[in-house]
Amino acid sequence: MATTLKLTWDKVTRRWCKVYKGHKLYLGYGKSKSDLKSYQLALEQFDIKRADIDREAEASKPYQAEYADAIRLRQEMLKWLDLEQENREQYDLYPTILALDAESDRTDWPTWQQEHDRLAKEIERLNLDASRVKPPKLGEPGFLPIDPLAYRPQEQREFWNERIDALRSYQRWTQAKDPANTLEANVDQFLKERAAQARAGKIAAKRYDCCRRDLEIFKKHIGPLPIEQFSGKQLTSFHTHLLAKISQGNYSKAYAKTILTDVKHFTTWLWEQEVIEQLPRNFKRLSIDLDTTTPQTIPIKTVKTLVKGATGPVKLYILLMLNCGFTQKDIADLLQTEVNWETGHISRKRSKTKKRETCPVVNYKLWPETFRLLKEYRSNDPTLALVNDRGNPLRQLALKDDDKLKTNDSIRKALVVLCDELNITQPAPKLFRKTSSTLIYNAKQFRGLDGLFLGHAPDSVATTNYNAVGETILDEAIDYLGQQYGIEQEMLLM
C-alpha cells in the first residue's frame, strides 16, 4: 500500500472514512490499516460518493441553470459560425438554413473571425464565473451579460434567433435520420455494457435480465427520440405512466420502483458518458414510495401439509429452506466442503453475500430428517453437494448469445409439481426462509438471532468487531423451528 493514504483509518470502528466538502463519509470495514483489499474497495466507494456530492453541489449553485443556458446558447452560435465558414456541405440539404444564410453577409456586422473569437472568450469566462454566488451587475468590474443577445441591436437579435431556431430544427432532423443518436441506440449500448458485466460475474445474470426488461418498457413508452431531446419531460412522463399502472392494478409499487430505478441508472450513465450535459433537474424528485407492510409468511398448517406430502428430493429442498433459511440458489450452490457429513451441520455464507466481508459464516444444525435426506441424495460431484438428474446444478442462470436469460430451476419445478398434487397454491420459495426467520424473531428467547439465521451482516460495531459468533448459538432456535413445524413428530410416524 502506498505510504500516503487518501483515506483515514478509524481504529475504533475499524472503518475507512473521509471528510469531503463537509460530509463525513464512511466507506466500509477492514481488518486493519494495512488491509489493501478493503482500502481499494473503500476508494471505489469514495469515488462514487464524491461524484454524487459534486453533482448535487453543482446543481444547487445559485444561477447555475442560467449559466448553463447562457453557455449553451453561445455554443450554438459558435456552431452556426463553424458551419457557415467551413462546413456548409453539412447542411445544404436543409432549405431553411440556406435561405437564412443568404442574409449573413452584412458589412456593418463583426467579421466571422471577430464574432467567433469573442464568443469563445465569453464561454471561457462564463465557465469560470459559474462558481460565483450571483452574476455581476451591469457596470461592475468584470461584468458579462448572461444573455449574449441582450445588449445587441434588435436586428442582430432577430438574425441570431432565426439562425439558432433553424440550427436546432436541423439538428433534430439529422438526429432523427441517424439511429446512433437516438434514445433507443443509447439504451442498447447501455445494455451491452451490462451484459458484459453479467458475463464477467460483476452483476448477476438475473439482475441484467431485469434491467433489460425494465428499459424495454421505458423505450416503448418514450418512442423514437433524438438523444439531445431527452430531458426531465420524458422522465416525468414515464413516472406518471408508472403511477397510472400502479393505480390500475397492473404494477405493484415494488415493481414500478424497480423499473424507475433502472431508468435512473441509465440516465446517470448517459451523464457519465457525456451523452447529456447534465442530469435532468427533476432527477432526484421523481420517486415511488413503498407501503410499510407486514412480512408475508406461509401458514404453519400449510408448511406441515407440504412437509408431510413431500417425498424424495423435493422434501429435502423444503427442509433445507425451513431448516437453514436457504433460497434455491443457496441449495444449488451448497458445496461438499460446507457440510460436516459426520455431525450433521452446514457452515456457509449466503450465496448472495459471500463476497461481503461483514456477512458471517453461519453454522446450521440440521434436523435428523434433513441430514438423512441430504446424505441420501448427496451427489457424486466433487464440488456440489446436490445436482439434478442430469448431473447439472439445480439452478442455472446464464446469458445466451443473444443476451437473453436462460434459466433452469429444478427446485421451483419440483415445488410446482408437489403443490399441484396437493392442490395447494404454490408459495414463493423465499417465503419458507421468511417464515422461519419470523418464528425466531417472535420467540422472545431467540429474538436477535433472526438476522444471524438469515446470514445478514451485523448491525452494530460491537457485534462486528468484538463479539465472535459461537458455532452452536443457533442450535436451540433451530430445534424450536422443528417443533413448530412438527418435523420431529412427523419423522416418528414414518
Image: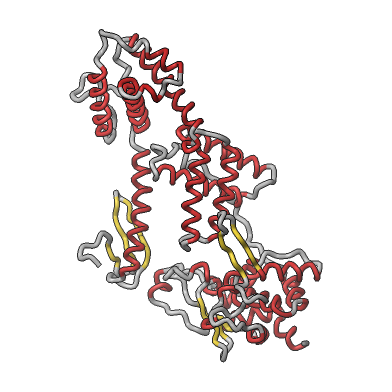
Looking at the image, can residue 144 be seen? no
Color encoding of the figure: secondary structure
- Look at 56% across and 91% down and name the residue there: 342
- Look at 73% across and 86% down and name the residue there: 491
- Look at 51% across and 50% down and name the residue there: 191
Question: Could you tell me which quadrant the N terminus lies in?
Answer: bottom left
Q: Is residue 327 above or below residue 474?
A: above
Q: Quadrant of residue 115?
A: top left
Residue found at the far bottom of this picture: 342
488 displayed left or right of 160: right
Q: Is residue 253 above or below residue 234?
A: below
- Look at 24% across and 15% down and name the residue there: 111
Q: Is residue 275 above or below residue 177?
A: below
Q: How far across and down, in percent of the image, does residue 432 sit?
A: 65, 70
Q: Nearer the viewer, residue 103 or 445?
A: 103
Q: How far across and down, in percent of the image, does residue 340 sit?
A: 54, 87
Q: Nearer the viewer, residue 177 or 471?
A: 177
Q: How far across and down, in percent of the image, does residue 416 sit?
A: 73, 67
400 displayed left or right of 197: right
Residue found at the far left of this picture: 141
Question: Could you tell me which quadrant the C terminus lies in?
Answer: bottom right
Residue found at the far front of this picture: 89
Q: Is residue 219 above or below residue 350?
A: above
Q: How far across and down, in percent of the image, does residue 18 sit?
A: 30, 57
Looking at the image, can residue 131 be seen? yes
